[in-house]
Image: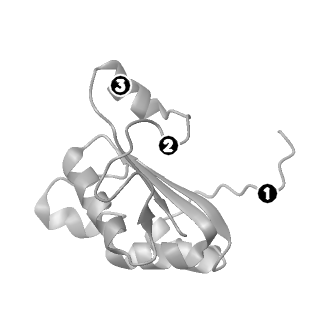
Amino acid sequence: ARGLTNLIALKANANSHLDPLIPDGSAIFVAINHPDPWYKKRHHKRRVVSDAFVAILVRKLAPQGEIHAQTDYEPVGQEILATLGRHPRLKNCTGPDQFAPESTTGILTEREITHLGRGEPIYRMRFCLP
């Protein structure tokens, strides 16, 4: 509707489709908003953000590309923070082992608005590819 030619939005399974759909070195911004927490330990293998996923994602990033992630579930936030922080090419733009204090884009998701309305925290992260 706005005539943008530099934006692509995809609805796909990120774990299965990221590698074949996105050319290496082409993404300047990736948002991971409230990924499914899969609370039970036996289901943790289904979580989106893993070391293998991050390795593919970093390969897809252009120079100075960024990954922004957020969740309303602290254990998942801590896990994502650690997983992104382990990758040797990524830098936490907020500081080592730190969550971003506010929205990293200024755009609030519906889920974020709901949780903030209840006074619940959102765990936000911003990682950059130097």
- For the point 64% across and 67% down, the residue is 27
Task: Point out the residue furthest to the right here.
Answer: 3
Type of the residue with mark 3: Leu
Q: How many angstroms separate mark 2 from mark 1 (CA)?
A: 21 Å
Image vertical order of residue 94 relative to residue 21, above or below: above
Task: Point out the residue furthest to the left here.
Answer: 41
Type of the residue with mark 1: Asn
Instruction: Give the residue pinned by disc 3.
Output: 116
Q: Is residue 20 left or right of residue 120?
A: right
Instruction: Give the residue pinned by disc 2.
Output: 104
Mark 3 vs 2, N-terminal side: 2
Residue 121: x and y, percent?
28, 32
How dense is the environment of label 1, judged by Cα within 10 Å: few (below 14), some, or many (20 and up)? few
Mark 2 vs 1, N-terminal side: 1
Q: Secondary structure at mark 2?
A: loop
Mark 3 vs 1, N-terminal side: 1
Residue 40 appears in which quarter of the rendering? bottom left
Instruction: Give the residue pinned by disc 1.
Output: 6
Residue 48: x and y, percent?
36, 64
